[in-house]
Image: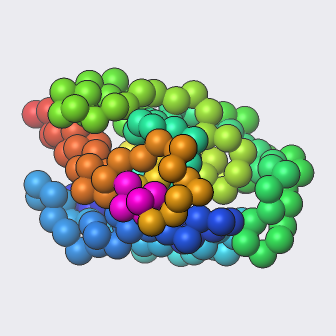
């Protein structure tokens, strides 16, 4: 089985994006019988979706799991719903401010992740990693990537989802201005993503038996 993991480059005032670190760490790794490809996307609406379009045309990925940073959480947020909207007062790294455009023209208003979110959440908690299911990925680039992935892969039965992660502890330790933010060690964040992949693939194997 082929698995694609995406993260984002650094953005805004955050000099390190843990989603980028995890995508790079997992690139070329094998989990179970699955080969992982890790890719980093720019925090630019147009460029991110163009890059994603090329990646999704390479093959029929069995699983596409996208990652993004939410510096305001202290847990692993497993996103359930992707919305067909781009809207944020915060500009992307090219200065573009989205104001309600559709991610995919004429696409469904909402698409739903088909990952086993409850099983992933429970496994993470069993491993001592705080996790919860989230019902909105916002309307910034994270949501755009999440929606676009689902729009493409649900057509052929692929599995897709999005996970928001907090800042990594190692970065916060060097940035006193973020000492009030929640964080997790990068190894813990990577372990959480690996558990999400393993759990999803295991469920797929169970269904095929």
Which image quarter: residue 39? Answer: bottom left
In front of the other: 157 or 173: 173
Looking at this rendering, what residue extends furthest in the right direction? 99
Percent coordinates x, y for residue 2 in the rendering: 27, 62
Percent coordinates x, y for residue 199 in the rendering: 22, 39
Q: Could you tell me which residue is drawn at 45 percent across and 66 percent down? A: 174
Q: Could you tell me which residue is drawn at 40 percent across and 39 percent down? A: 76
Residue numbers of the magenta segment: 169-173
198 drawn magenta: no
Give the colour scheme of this rendering: rainbow
Q: Could you tell me which residue is drawn at 23 percent across and 74 percent down? A: 28
Percent coordinates x, y for residue 77 in the rendering: 46, 36
Percent coordinates x, y for residue 111 in the rendering: 59, 36
Q: Could you tell me which residue is drawn at 51 percent across and 50 percent down? A: 179
Q: Is residue 91 left or right of residue 25?
A: right
Question: How many circles with numbers are drawn on the protein?
Answer: 0
Looking at this rendering, what residue extends furthest in the front direction? 176
Q: Quadrant of the C terminus?
A: top left
In front of the other: 179 or 36: 179
Res 12 seen here: yes
Q: Is residue 99 left or right of residue 63?
A: right
Eyeballing the image, is 150 above or below 77?
below
Eyeballing the image, is 133 above or below 138?
above
Q: Main secondary structure of the magenta part?
A: helix
């Amino acid at each position: 089985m082929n698995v694609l993991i995406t993260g984002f480059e650094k953005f805004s005032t955050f000099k390190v994006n843990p989603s980028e670190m995890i995508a790079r760490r997992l690139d070329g790794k094998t989990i179970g019988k699955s080969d992982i490809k890790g890719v980093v996307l720019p925090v630019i609406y147009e460029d991110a979706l163009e890059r994603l379009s090329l990646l999704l045309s390479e093959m029929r990925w069995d699983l596409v799991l996208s990652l993004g940073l939410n510096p305001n959480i202290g847990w692993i947020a497993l996103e359930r719903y992707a919305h067909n909207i781009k809207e944020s007062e915060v500009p992307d790294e090219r200065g573009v401010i989205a104001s309600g455009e559709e991610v995919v023209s004429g696409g469904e208003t909402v698409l739903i992740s088909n990952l086993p979110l409850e099983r992933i959440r429970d496994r993470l908690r069993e491993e001592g990693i705080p996790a919860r299911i989230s019902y909105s990925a916002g309307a910034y680039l994270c949501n755009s990537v999440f929606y676009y992935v689902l729009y493409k892969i649900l057509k052929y039965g692929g599995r897709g989802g999005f996970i928001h992660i907090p800042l990594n502890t190692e970065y916060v330790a060097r940035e006193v201005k973020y000492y009030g933010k929640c964080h997790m060690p990068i190894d813990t964040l990577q372990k959480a993503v690996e558990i999400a992949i393993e759990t999803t693939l295991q469920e797929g194997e169970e269904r095929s038996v």
